[in-house]
Image: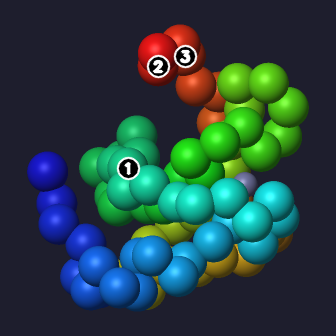
């Protein structure tokens, strides 16, 4: 699992620009790090995922992808 390049305090202030959600570290289908909404963002079970480019989170709605999440209870 790749580790993010930024500090924990940075993570804590990062928020989804669409819904203000907290973000969690994920790895996308290509094995690249990304940040994903911790809560549903685009309807039930759908969350935005923001790319992390060269260690810098790109928190732009236009660059986000919407992913479907399964039951994670
Ligand atoms: Zn969101």
x and y percentages locating residue 34 in the rendered image: 44, 60
Q: Nearer the viewer, mark 1 or mark 2?
A: 2
Q: Which residue is mark 3?
A: 70
At a point 70% along the width and 24% down the height, the residue shown is 45
Location of residue 18 in the rendering, given as x and y in whole percent from the top left corner: 83, 64
Write down which quadrant ligand 1 falls in.
Answer: bottom right
Horizontal arrangement in the rendering, residue 3 relative to residue 9 (left or right) = left
Q: Earlier in the sequence, mark 1 or mark 2?
A: 1
Q: Residues within 10 Å of mark 2 (few under 14, many from 20)?
A: few
- Asked whether the beta carbons under mark 3 and mark 1 sit within 8 Å of each other, the answer is no
- Percent position (x, y) of residue 12? 45, 76
Q: Vertical placement of 2 versus 31: above or below?
A: below
Residue 35 visible to an observer of this rendering: yes
Residue placed most toward the observer, 50 or 6: 6
Establish whether ligand 1 lies closer than 8 Å to the Cβ of label 3.
no
Q: Residue at x 47, y 15 (%)?
A: 73
Q: Secondary structure at mark 1?
A: strand
Position of residue 45 in the picture relative to residue 72 (left or right): right
Q: Residue 72: which disc?
A: 2
Question: Is 42 displayed left or right of 52 in the figure?
Answer: right
Question: Distance of mark 3 from mark 1, alpha carbons?
Answer: 14 Å
* Numbered circles on residues, count: 3
What residue lies at 25% left-to-right and 72% top-to-bottom? 4
Q: Which mark is residue 13?
A: none
Give percent across and percent down for residue 47.
Answer: 68, 41
Disc 3 and disc 2: Cα gap in Å? Answer: 6 Å
Disc 3 + disc 2, Cβ < 8 Å: yes
Q: Nearer the viewer, residue 43 or 9?
A: 9
User: Residue 26, which numbered label?
Assistant: 1
Residue drawn at the location 29% of the way across and 79% of the way down: 8
Q: Residues within 10 Å of mark 1 (few under 14, many from 20)?
A: many
């Amino acid at each position: 699992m790749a580790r993010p390049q930024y500090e924990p305090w940075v993570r804590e202030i990062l928020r989804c620009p669409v819904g203000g959600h907290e973000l969690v570290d994920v790895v996308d289908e290509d094995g690249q790090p990304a940040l994903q909404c911790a809560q549903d963002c685009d309807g039930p079970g759908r969350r935005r995922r923001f790319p992390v480019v060269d260690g810098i989170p790109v928190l732009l709605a236009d660059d986000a992808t919407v992913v479907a999440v399964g039951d994670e209870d």
